Image (spheres, rainbow, N blue to C red):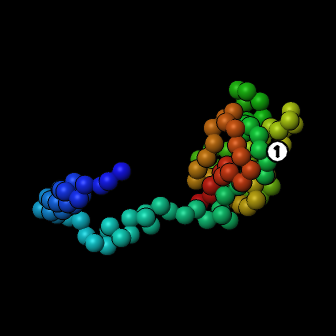
Amino acid sequence: MEIDKNIILKLISVLEDLKKSLNDKDYKIKPDDLENQTNIVEKEDPKKSVKSPIVGTAYLAPEPGAKKFVEVGKKIKKGDTVIIVEAMKTMNHIPSSQDGTVKKICVEDGQPVEFGQNLIIFE
């Protein structure tokens, strides 16, 4: 397959025109923005999360219809059960590894989880 140089030149021209039109408007693209756009994703602190120790199915309550172990904003103490992961018909209670306030619950009730997947994130 041969690449047509005219098509490449036309594409470069169109992209440069697009960049100029964006700079003329309120969008104002800075060279730093283009270079650092891969750094936008925040990294979670691994010390502030509870990860799944096994592959299985996550449950947020001890039984259907019961009160959930954790809610966003709830204060948790180290050792409290935060979630149950069922594996091979065994209900494994997953304890909190630290004291803290729940910032985010990363799984839904009945969702399959993988080893090492974030379950709960603390503030």
Give coordinates of residue 81: x percent, y percent: 78, 47
Q: Quick one: 81 or 52, which is closer to the camera?
A: 52
| Res. 101 in view | no
State the residue lying farthest toward the bottom. 32
The residue that appears at 77% across and 44% down in the rendered structure is 55
The residue that appears at 32% across and 67% down in the rendered structure is 34
Image: 105 above or below 62 = below
State the residue lying farthest toward the top. 65
Label 1 secondary element: strand
Q: Tell me if mark 1 has few (under 14), some (14-19) or many (20+) residues whose alpha carbon lies within 10 angstroms of its own.
A: some
Give coordinates of residue 109: x percent, y percent: 67, 35
Task: Residue under label 1, please give it.
Answer: 93
The residue that appears at 79% across and 48% down in the rendered structure is 54
Q: Quick one: 80 or 94, which is closer to the camera?
A: 94
Q: Quick one: 25 or 18, which is closer to the camera?
A: 18
| Res. 9 in view | yes
Tell me which corner region of the image, top left, top right, bottom left or bottom right, holds residue 36.
bottom left
Tell me which corner region of the image, top left, top right, bottom left or bottom right, holds residue 65.
top right
Q: How many marks?
A: 1
Tell me which corner region of the image, top left, top right, bottom left or bottom right, holds residue 62.
top right
Q: Amino acid at mark 1?
A: His
The residue that appears at 80% across and 37% down in the rendered structure is 86
Give coordinates of residue 15: x percent, y percent: 21, 58
Q: Quick one: 28 or 44, which is closer to the camera?
A: 28
Image: 12 above or below 58 = below
Left or right: 93 with respect to 107? right
Give coordinates of residue 79: x percent, y percent: 80, 55
